[in-house]
């Protein structure tokens, strides 16, 4: 299942990538562009725009104003599960890399206190376990507590 978020749903797109779903997002895009991309790549268009929703067959109208509610809506509607995360910045795949290989890339403190590192295959951003991931996991756990599909 792949997604495409409209211009108002950038934060939701980031979270869907963290959940591991291939999600495209454009800060500026015409409705027609989103509609045809959704058809061409068979992506579910997530939108807050009722007009766009009605124009586009494969779309879902997001109701919530805040991101937690939006994520819960989408997780329930499409029965999403937590998969291997993708890059939250560019949607690229994350590859596990050796600790040594990121020595010159990450801050010394991060290097000293972490063992597991991932690198985005597209933009090269490095990810590691630690407080940031813990915060993300807490948020996702809360979302899945409110999940009501199997
Ligand atoms: Zn990336």
Image (cartoon, rainbow, N blue to C red):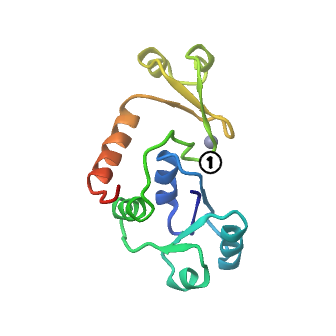
Looking at the rendering, the quadrant in which ligand 1 lies is top right
Q: Quadrant of residue 66?
A: bottom left
Residue at position x 39%, y 28% in the image: 130
Residue 100: image x %, image y %? Answer: 59, 13
Check the image and name the residue furthest to the front.
150
Q: Quadrant of the C terminus?
A: bottom left
From what the image shows, is residue 102 above or below residue 64? above
Residue 46: image x %, image y %? Answer: 52, 69
Residue at position x 39%, y 74% in the image: 63
From what the image shows, is residue 50 above or below residue 37? below
Q: Quadrant of residue 7?
A: bottom right
Query: Can you tell me whether the CB of the residue at mark 1 lies under 8 Å from the nearest atom of ligand 1?
Result: yes
Left or right of residue 32, residue 56 in this image: left
Mark 1 packing: few (<14 Cα in 10 Å), some, or many (20+)? some
Left or right of residue 80, residue 105 in this image: right
From what the image shows, is residue 99 above or below residue 87? above
Question: Which residue is labeled 1 in the image?
Answer: 90
Residue 78: image x %, image y %? Answer: 45, 62
State the residue in front, 52 or 104: 52
Residue at position x 54%, y 24% in the image: 106
Residue at position x 45%, y 14% in the image: 112
């Amino acid at each position: 299942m792949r997604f495409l978020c409209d211009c108002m749903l950038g934060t939701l797109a980031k979270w869907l990538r963290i959940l591991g779903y291939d999600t495209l997002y454009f800060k500026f895009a015409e409705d027609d562009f989103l509609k045809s991309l959704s058809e061409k790549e068979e992506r579910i268009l997530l939108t807050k725009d009722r007009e766009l929703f009605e124009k586009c067959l494969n779309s879902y109208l997001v109701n919530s104003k805040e991101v937690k509610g939006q994520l819960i809506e989408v997780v329930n509607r499409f029965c999403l599960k937590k998969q291997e995360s993708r890059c939250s910045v560019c949607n690229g795949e994350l590859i596990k890399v050796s600790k040594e290989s990121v020595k010159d890339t990450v801050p010394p403190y991060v290097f000293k206190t972490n063992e597991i590192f991932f690198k985005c295959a597209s933009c090269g951003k490095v990810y590691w376990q630690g407080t940031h991931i813990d915060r993300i996991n807490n948020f996702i756990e809360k979302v899945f507590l409110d999940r009501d599909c199997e």
